[in-house]
Amino acid sequence: MYEIGNGDDKLSTKNNSELNNLDRILSNSETDMNNFIGDMLKYCPCDAVIKKQRIYKAKNIKRKRKSKTQVKQLEKEFKKNSSWSKEDIQRLSKQIGLNRDQVYKWFWDNKKKSDF
């Protein structure tokens, strides 16, 4: 892995040595550009959504479908109360065996459907 910088993303005269290090790596004829770019994309700070997508692709994680009982439980809760708090989402995720993001996404999608 190519190590560049100290976590400070701002360009300034203070981190000029990191820029010089980057220039040295890029100018070196032995640098494998595919590995270099892969490492930069994998380890450099970026938008959280893009980073999450890269992690899922790297781990080759497949989307899990919700069971019929899980969907019924979500629908039942949504009929009772159509505005969920973070605590509600957390409670439901533990209760029905889904992660918090799956419950939130289901809630968000159904909230948008009900707005039409």
Image: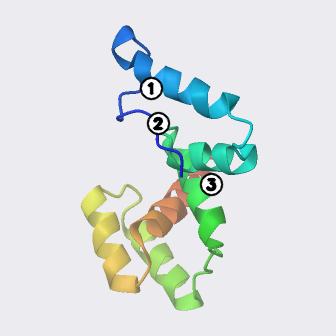
58 relative to 72, above or below? above
Report the residue that reaches farthest toward the top.
13
Q: Amino acid at mark 1?
A: Glu
Pointer 1: residues within 10 angstroms few (<14), some, or many (20+)?
Answer: some
94 relative to 114, above or below? below
Give the alpha-carbon distance from disc 2 to disc 1, as whole Å: 6 Å
Residues at circles 1 and 3 in contact by the CB criterion of under 8 Å = no
Image point 59% across, 28% down: which residue?
A: 24
Front in this rendered view, residue 36 or 61: 36
Q: What SS does tag 3 mark?
A: helix
Disc 3 versus disc 2: nearer the observer: 2
* Percent of width and height locating residue 103: 45, 68
Image point 36% across, 63% down: which residue?
A: 81
10 relative to 67, above or below? above
Residues at circles 2 and 1 in contact by the CB criterion of under 8 Å = yes
Front in this rendered view, residue 44 or 33: 33
Q: Amino acid at mark 2?
A: Ile
Residue 62 in view? yes
Dot 1 corresponds to which residue? 18
Residues at circles 3 and 2 in contact by the CB criterion of under 8 Å = no
Going from the N terminus, do you reach mark 1 or mark 3 first? 1
Q: Is residue 17 left or right of 23 when viewed as pictured?
A: left
Give the alpha-carbon distance from disc 1 to disc 3, as whole Å: 49 Å
Disc 1 versus disc 3: nearer the observer: 1
Colouring: rainbow
Q: Amino acid at mark 3?
A: Lys
Residue 82: give its label.
Answer: none
Dot 3 corresponds to which residue? 113
Dot 2 corresponds to which residue? 4
